[in-house]
Amino acid sequence: TDWGLGTCFIAAFDEKKLKEVLGIPDNIRVVGLTPLGYPAEKKGIIGTLTSTFIKSHQRKEFDQIVSLNHWDQPYKTEDKE
């Protein structure tokens, strides 16, 4: 991202435990996680190619897709500052 953040997709987790810890309602199905953070190292050729050729011009606002520590606590960009 333009903030220097990276992510990866996780599909192997205990959905029941995850919902309990994060307060996610029972009627919501969690099929994957995308943790967000600052990469520990520079990306290789695959990461470079992916970021160069796969770009969306219709991205949602960061606040619309990120929660902070709990399902019902939307992350606000002013929280970053």
Image (spheres, helix red, strand yellow):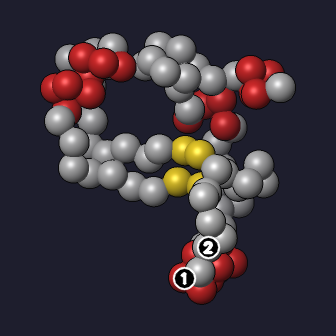
Q: Residues within 10 Å of mark 2 (few under 14, many from 20)?
A: few
| Residue of label 1 | 46
Task: Between residue 80 and residue 76, name the one nearer to us.
Answer: 80
Residue 32, placed above or below residue 16: below
Please name the residue shown 33% across and 52% down the image.
Answer: 10
| Residue of label 2 | 43
Identity, as a three-letter code, of the amino acid under mark 2: Lys
Please name the residue shown 62% across and 66% down the image.
Answer: 41
Residue 12, placed above or below residue 70: below
Could one spot residue 50 in this view of the protein? no
Quadrant that contains the N terminus = bottom right
Quadrant that contains the C terminus = top right
Residue 73: % across, % down: 53, 14
Helix or strand or loop: what does disc 2 sit on?
A: loop
- Contact (CB < 8 A) between labels 2 and 1? yes
Residue at the limit of the structure toward the front, as seen here: 40
Residue 35: % across, % down: 47, 44
